[in-house]
Image: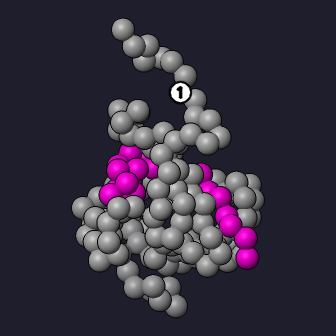
Amino acid sequence: MENSNAITAVGNNEGQYLLVAGSNYRILISGDQTNGNYAVIEMRVPPGSGPIPHAHKDVQETFYLAEGEVEFRTEGSKYYAQKGAFINIPRGGAIHAFKNTSDKEATLICTVIPAGFDSMFREMSVAGPEEVETIGERYGNRFYPTDFFD
């Protein structure tokens, strides 16, 4: 019988690696491992990269910036995050985006509650560019033009 109270450990080079929107993602723990409660994804984002403005009303996202500098934007604010910063995007559908504004790769640790985006990222990593938005919408995302905040 499997012990449901066992610790889950993921080594430095373990986890599932994915290429999503020009960034390298690693699933540290998936919804399959947490009964759908949450998933944790390491995001290695190259300079100038990041997701376009989007919203998801039923998912909370948190980001811990482990390395680098990233600009987070919402309709009413802009925050320049540096190593050690923590950002919370609550449920409710706030339009947001982030972009690596530095000249070095940034590493974010993203937690999504509930899980599901881990599955979405798996699908996106093997899809063509024309399919990405449709996949995202199936997981409750709404996308906005890249210049939405301008």
Residue sitting at 72 percent across and 59 percent down?
A: 67
Out of 108 and 15, give the one closest to the viewer: 15
Out of 60 and 12, give the one closest to the viewer: 12
The quadrant in which residue 129 appears is bottom left
Direction from residue 103 to residue 53 in the image, left or right: left
Quadrant housing the N terminus: top left
Q: Position of residue 47 (x, y in %)?
A: 65, 75
Q: Position of residue 42 (x, y in %)?
A: 57, 52
Residue sitting at 50 percent across and 85 percent down?
A: 149
Q: Position of residue 137 (x, y in %)?
A: 27, 66
Residue sitting at 52 percent across and 91 percent down?
A: 150
Write down the residue under mark 1. 8
| Magenta stretch, residue numbers | 103-123
Give the amino acid type for the residue marked by disc 1 in the picture.
Thr
Q: Position of residue 135 (x, y in %)?
A: 28, 64
Direction from residue 139 to residue 31 in the image, left or right: right
> Residue 45: within the magenta?
no
The quadrant in which residue 148 appears is bottom left
Secondary element under disc 1, as helix, strand or loop, is loop
- Color scheme of the displayed model: one colour
